[in-house]
Image (cartoon, helix red, strand yellow):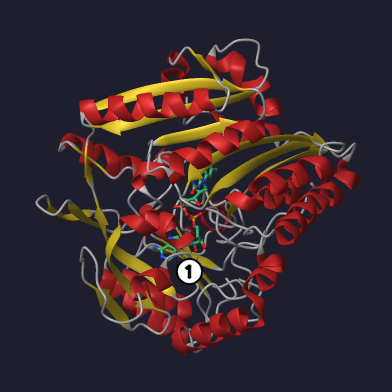
Amino acid sequence: VSLAAGVFDGLLAIVGEGAVSGDPADRAAVAHDLWPKALIDERQGRPTPPPDCVVWPSTRAEVVAIYRLCSATHTPVVPFGAGTGVCGASIALRGGVALDTKRMAAILDWDEASGHVRVEPGILGIHLETACLERGLTLGHYPSSLVCSTVGGFLATRSVGQLSTRYGRIDDMVAGLEVVLADGVEVSLAPQPATGAGPDLRRLFLGSEGGFGLIVEATLRLHRVPERRADVAALFAGFHDGIAAAREVMQTGLRPALLRLYDPDDTALQASHLGVGEGSGALFLGACEGRTGVAEAEASALTEVCRTHGAEIVDSSAVATWYSRRYDIGFQQAKYLPVPGAVLDTIEVAAPWSRLGLLYDTVKERLRQRLVVLCHLSHGYVDGACLYFTFAGMGGDEDTALPLYEELWSTVMAAVAECGGTIAHHHGVGLARAPYIAAELGDGGMETLRRIKRALDPNGIANPGKWGLDR
Ligand SMILES: Cc1cc2nc3c(=O)[nH]c(=O)nc-3n(C[C@H](O)[C@H](O)[C@H](O)COP(=O)(O)OP(=O)(O)OC[C@H]3O[C@@H](n4cnc5c(N)ncnc54)[C@H](O)[C@@H]3O)c2cc1C
């Protein structure tokens, strides 16, 4: 352990025996998240250097004391939820302390009249959702990693679930937030349905990736479990026809929980899993949730929009099959990446409707010669949508795998800049997007971020070295 003198003992005094460790196995377990570059590096014999120790606080008072100690001793602190981030955000670039939130995983309070639940950050999404369902409630947040990621991670990366078109992104679910800043100051933003009390400080901490301190509590908005789900499946002649239909859906006020359109390459892959036809064209899956009459009426309006745009309506049982397998696919990545030469990643971006088709064409055009490029549209908004690309291929051998991986990222990020999209929709920034954030935020935006960072983290100890900032 190469921490400054007294830090390890100081942590031990705060959290007690068994809640801090410098053991190599404990440190290795939190050395990185599921960023594919870190996995390729590991495969090629360059493991990510781990933090110097891991601490598992159980209370907010311990968190405050940890940050005070680390701030005073200029020791980096990097929060660790479940480590399913895919951008390297939890890598302790400058060593220091990994603050694992596992022991802060309680449900603290229910306000069922308001539909609020107050939780600690280390609770797994699936544990929270299960507790909600027992009360006839749902958070409505279903990332593919629901079973293995934490609420703190959702908030710190601005996660988006599969049914976001109806339920919103995690940002929309936050009614109240409690944060411990990097120097130990406590911020308490009480749950409200809406507030106009100055700038929205709750939002400041969403997407903060541990860069301002630790989110220690959140009050989240819940919904009643829907009475009915009405499914629609359709095949469009091409992806652009489907995009036009999705735009009409969103701009005419429909809000299906599931709005998902696969491009022809992705359709070819999905069709056999989902049992829909030969797999030609662009497959659309939609699901409307709510009161029975409303869900059914919305599904028939959705069907009508699809038909208007030339789609063939196909067996809607494909949607039920998709629901039953919706947490399976992501885990294939971990199996595939150990293969020498393999390159695999997903990149989610977004753009306004007017530029979405161009962005899609540009990315496909530039990378399809080198890699398998699959894409689906999901997460609809009135003014645009997310494009979620999956890239897979072989670099030939290990020497070419990493250059191909780097080229993949720089090509997509350049296409986004050219076409007027945003570099990230829901996986955060981490190290993967650090080289590209300045181009998106501009000089003024970066200066604002730098000043906020300095003000909230005066000693530069909160997950330092991220966001393309030097501290
Ligand atoms: C198979 C798979 C499927 C996925 N599907 C989705 C998906 O559908 N939608 C989606 O949005 N994402 C998805 N992800 C990405 C990932 O699961 C999310 O980013 C998730 O929010 C990360 O949560 P975590 O608990 O694992 O966070 P971690 O990876 O542990 O941490 C992520 C970042 O948040 C910081 N952090 C963690 N807790 C706190 C806290 N309490 N306070 C402050 N900072 C904190 C960490 O320091 C780090 O910077 C997927 C990942 C995988 C592997």
Nearer to us in this view, 28 or 227: 227
**Residue at (25% x, 31% y) in the render:** 294
Q: How many marks?
A: 1
State the image coordinates of residue 336 (x, y, percent, origin top left).
Answer: 69, 32
State the image coordinates of residue 171 (x, y, percent, origin top left).
Answer: 38, 59
Task: Name the residue that disc number 1 marks.
Answer: 208
The answer to whether 331 is drawn above or below residue 345 in the figure is: above
Going by the image, does 439 lie left or right of 220? right
Going by the image, does 136 lie left or right of 463? left
Residue 112 visible somewhere in the drawing:
yes
Nearer to us in this view, 240 or 434: 240
Outermost residue to the front: 308
Residue 46 sits in which quadrant? Answer: bottom right
State the image coordinates of residue 134 (x, y, percent, origin top left).
Answer: 17, 35
Residue 13 visible somewhere in the drawing:
no
| Quarter of the image with the C terminus in it | bottom right
The answer to whether 259 is drawn above or below residue 220 in the figure is: above
**Residue at (27% x, 70% y) in the render:** 60
Q: Secondary structure at mark 1?
A: loop
10 Å neighbourhood of mark 1: few (<14), some, or many (≥20)?
many
Residue 58 sits in which quadrant? Answer: bottom left
Q: Is mark 1 within 8 Å of ligand 1?
A: yes
The answer to whether 109 is drawn above or below residue 366 in the figure is: below
**Residue at (42% x, 77% y) in the render:** 9
**Residue at (54% x, 52% y) in the render:** 85
Residue kind at label 1, given as amino acid type: Ser
